[in-house]
Image (cartoon, rainbow, N blue to C red):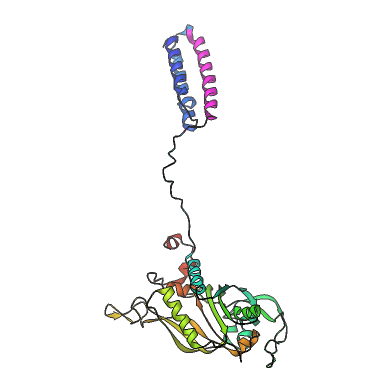
């Protein structure tokens, strides 16, 4: 290689670099990398005649300085990109609410349409609100330590008394008993009576509850929604109409409710609530065989009843003047009975498995 050929190749490399508009690791390595254009050309120095080697070395030094300077300048120059601003943007990936949160929003909306107000009360509360005020004596099985999570905290002590002639003369504002994780949302009943003081009351309370049991149909933490209506002249017909309305709105036209006699301490009379099966339209028969989903045409969902007079008294409401009804059941249970879900293990809802949650 002659010195003139070397100069020609150096000029070609510099001109090639002039066409670069963006510096990145690939462009820099193309010119100054171990296998880049500069090092490839340096290897040709052995083919240059001895009298020209000194000049060639100087040319290589100049070339390296030129490349480093130009690459540095290019790195500070923004790349010009042609953008069509009329093109639609790429769709942004967004998440969605957890299926139970979606169910709670839907339940709230359904009851708000008929005048219910969404309330929320403590999930860690005094034994008095969770049990005592709801007509549950100390010996009641629901207050057993095998059913309830008790909080390790000092007990508050106060006497509870009622004056039949003055229902508002009741327990002091600081109530007593142990502190527990609420086993149901019914602790909000007396608290709502205390808050509003005078009927009418139309409350929907949705909150977390805790019980010491876990299997395919139960979790130690779950959600309930509690309905409470108190006013003059409230009766079982009002309760049944409300249940029918919710069944139709949540599960679709044609869904019905039924109530069966039962016993709860805080309602009298008390009922178990069933909704008709949407798979077999409440017949119990599907494609000529017994419906595998419900087996009887009905699904048990929860409890309901007329508010017990003692509960009204605990909330400072005169049971001689006012009556009311209450109902409550699990959000998870209610949701998993929706058409098309058929979730056979409620624990899936809290597994955190994105393969499951993305389906909603």
| Chief secondary structure of the magenta portion | helix
Vertical comparison of 226 with 25: above or below: below
What segment is highlighted magenta in the picture? Answer: 52-80
> In the image, is residue 65 part of the stretch drawn in magenta?
yes
Q: Residue shown at 45%/8% (left/top)?
A: 49
Q: Residue shown at 67%/80% (left/top)?
A: 178
Q: Residue shown at 39%/74% (left/top)?
A: 252
Image position of 266 (left or right of 33): right
Residue furthest left as drawn: 288
- Judging depth in this view, the residue of 108 and 48 nearest the camera is 108
- Judging depth in this view, the residue of 346 and 317 nearest the camera is 317
Residue 348: percent from the left, percent from the top? 46, 67
Image position of 354 (left or right of 201): left
Residue 55 at least partly seen: yes
Residue 301 at least partly seen: no
Residue 10: percent from the left, percent from the top? 46, 16
- Judging depth in this view, the residue of 42 and 17 nearest the camera is 17
- Judging depth in this view, the residue of 94 and 168 nearest the camera is 168
Total residue callouts:
0
Picture quarter with the N terminus: top left
Q: Residue shown at 60%/78% (left/top)?
A: 188
Residue furthest bottom as drawn: 165
Picture quarter with the C terminus: bottom left
Task: Using the rendered view, name the quadrant where residue 129 is placed.
Answer: bottom right
> In the image, is residue 30 part of the stretch drawn in magenta?
no
Residue 258: percent from the left, percent from the top? 43, 85
């Amino acid at each position: 290689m002659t010195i003139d050929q070397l100069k020609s190749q150096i000029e070609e490399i510099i001109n090639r670099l002039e066409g670069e508009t963006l510096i990145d690791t690939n462009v820099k390595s193309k010119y100054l990398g171990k296998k880049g254009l500069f090092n490839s050309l340096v290897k040709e120095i052995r083919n240059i005649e001895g009298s020209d080697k000194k000049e060639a070395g100087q040319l290589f030094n100049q070339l390296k300085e030129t490349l480093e300077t130009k690459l540095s300048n290019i790195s500070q120059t923004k790349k010009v990109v042609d953008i069509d601003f009329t093109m639609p943007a790429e769709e942004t990936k967004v998440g969605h609410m957890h299926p139970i949160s979606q169910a709670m929003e839907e339940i709230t909306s359904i009851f708000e349409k008929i005048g219910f107000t969404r309330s929320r009360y403590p999930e860690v509360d005094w034994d008095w609100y969770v049990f005592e005020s709801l007509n549950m004596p100390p010996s009641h099985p629901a207050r057993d330590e095998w059913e309830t999570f008790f909080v390790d905290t000092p007990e508050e002590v106060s006497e509870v008394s009622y004056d039949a002639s003055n229902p508002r003369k009741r327990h002091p504002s600081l109530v007593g008993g142990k502190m527990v994780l609420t086993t149901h949302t019914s602790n909000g009943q007396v608290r709502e009576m205390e808050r509003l003081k005078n009927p009418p009351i139309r409350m929907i309370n949705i909150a977390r509850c805790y019980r010491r049991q876990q299997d395919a149909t139960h979790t130690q933490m779950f959600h309930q929604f509690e309905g409470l209506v108190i006013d003059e002249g409230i009766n079982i017909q009002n309760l049944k109409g409300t249940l029918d309305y919710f069944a139709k709105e949540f599960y679709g036209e044609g869904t019905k409710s039924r109530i069966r006699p039962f016993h709860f301490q805080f309602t009298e009379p008390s009922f178990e609530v069933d909704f008709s099966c949407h798979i077999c339209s409440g017949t119990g028969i599907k494609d000529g065989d017994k419906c595998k989903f419900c087996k009887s045409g009905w699904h048990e969902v929860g409890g309901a009843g007329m508010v017990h007079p003692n509960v009204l008294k605990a909330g400072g409401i005169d049971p001689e003047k006012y009556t009311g009804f209450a109902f409550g059941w699990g959000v998870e249970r209610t949701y998993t009975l929706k058409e098309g879900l058929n979730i056979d293990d409620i624990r899936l809802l809290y597994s955190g498995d994105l393969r499951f949650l993305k389906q909603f």
